[in-house]
Amino acid sequence: MIEIVWCFRSRSVTDKKIRIAFYHPYFADGGAERSIIRLSAEFARMGHEIDIVTFRSLPNLIESARQHATVTNLPASRARYAIRPLARYLAKNQPDIIISNQRFANVTAAIAHFLVRSSAQLVFCERVDPRFEPREILDRLGLAGRAIQRWAYRRARSVIANSGGTKEGLTATMGISEDLVRVIYNPALAPEVPIKAREPVDHPWFGDDEPPVIVSVGRLSEQKDFATMIRAFSVLNKKTSARLFIIGEGPDKEDLVALADELEISSEIQFHNFTDNPYKYMARASVFALSSRWEGAPNVLIEALTLGVPVVSTDCRSGPNEILLDGEGGLLVPIAEPESMATSIQHLLDNQNLRDRLVRNGQAELGRFDPTASAVSYLNAAGY
């Protein structure tokens, strides 16, 4: 595990204390939420007043946000029903900046902003390349919905893409100018990661003299494609003694458990529920693996490199290629190809020199993901 020295600026890019509101409809336990927590904590450290506005939340992360932010729960069940409550929040609290996350939330934020003629600077965040999202998302919008979406995005002061690939996708599909979109990497280089990684693990697989463990973290959904991960592990398991530890929850869990049963590898796979500390497991992994079909800029790859764990990832759009330096900071494999993933994992397990070289290369460029740099870039994007 590496040791990181954290250097923070003492002041923000603006001497004025401002109010910054983060709007995120569903505060679960994902990478987007962790990025919001880290970014909002950094703004609070700079001396600014922070609001987090949501209408659905799981307790773990939202409670940690209350340490530095005021949390407002809107009376709504879906983004479109949150427009009027959000408008009332804006009129009453008058934030200086609104940082909105997720496509439909961004559109409703723009409408609420327009209804009350808010003077707040409107900043949208996009965390997934829209070119590779499922077709049903576009179909749900229809022509009128896409027109409203374009109107909403053109109202923003800036649109933040978390990778160069996400920016390319936004300008190609949303009809917005390249000048409007800024690339700001996720603030994933957080001080709590190596600290939490040192906590003890009470699981027999991570003991001494146990077979190597491949760890993966993510929502059990179509995007993350854990079916390919399980099939790759099945191939690997025929050649070497290893185990697969998956941390996550989601709609595909039942099917994934059934697939593991079908492949007769259930005893070597552990499905672990989401936890606020996946890092203690990641730090003890022999390999961290990501099997996504599409992404934005997956924090877990950055976190794995922070912890000194070698990485295998699909070369999906967008993010892994940028994070892993075109394969110099981790191995990249084609999407939905279990054999390729299994071969790459085996290669890492067998080659300590390769493991060390990839981690060393990846860690050399981790400064791109520093929370202070991200916070300053966000303020610049908002005109401060």
Image (tube, helix red, strand yellow):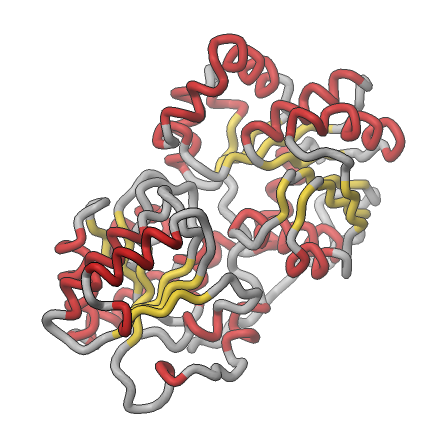
Please indicate whether residue 169 sits to the left or right of residue 114 in the image.
left
The answer, for residue 298, to whether it is visible in the render is yes
Q: In this view, does 332 lie above or below 169?
A: below
Q: Is residue 366 above or below residue 91?
A: below
212 and 21: which is toward the camera: 212
The residue that appears at 60% across and 42% down in the rendered structure is: 377
60 and 310: which is toward the camera: 60
Q: Which residue lies furthest to the left in this view?
A: 239
Q: In this view, does 278 lie above or below 109?
A: below
**Residue 51's spot in the image, x, y percent?**
77, 45
The residue that appears at 33% across and 59% down in the rendered structure is: 257
The answer, for residue 305, to whether it is visible in the render is no
364 and 105: which is toward the camera: 105
The residue that appears at 27% across and 49% down in the rendered structure is: 314
Q: Which residue lies furthest to the bottom in this view?
A: 209
| Quadrant of the image containing the C terminus | top right
**Residue 322's spot in the image, x, y percent?**
35, 46
The residue that appears at 25% across and 62% down in the rendered structure is: 261
> Residue 60 is drawn in which quadrant?
bottom right
**Residue 331's spot in the image, x, y percent?**
23, 57
Please indicate whether residue 51 sits to the left or right of residue 332 in the image.
right
| Quadrant of the image containing the N terminus | bottom left
Please indicate whether residue 256 sits to the left or right of residue 340 in the image.
right
**Residue 23's spot in the image, x, y percent?**
68, 38
Looking at the image, how many numbered discs can be counted on the residues?
0
> Residue 15 is drawn in which quadrant?
top right
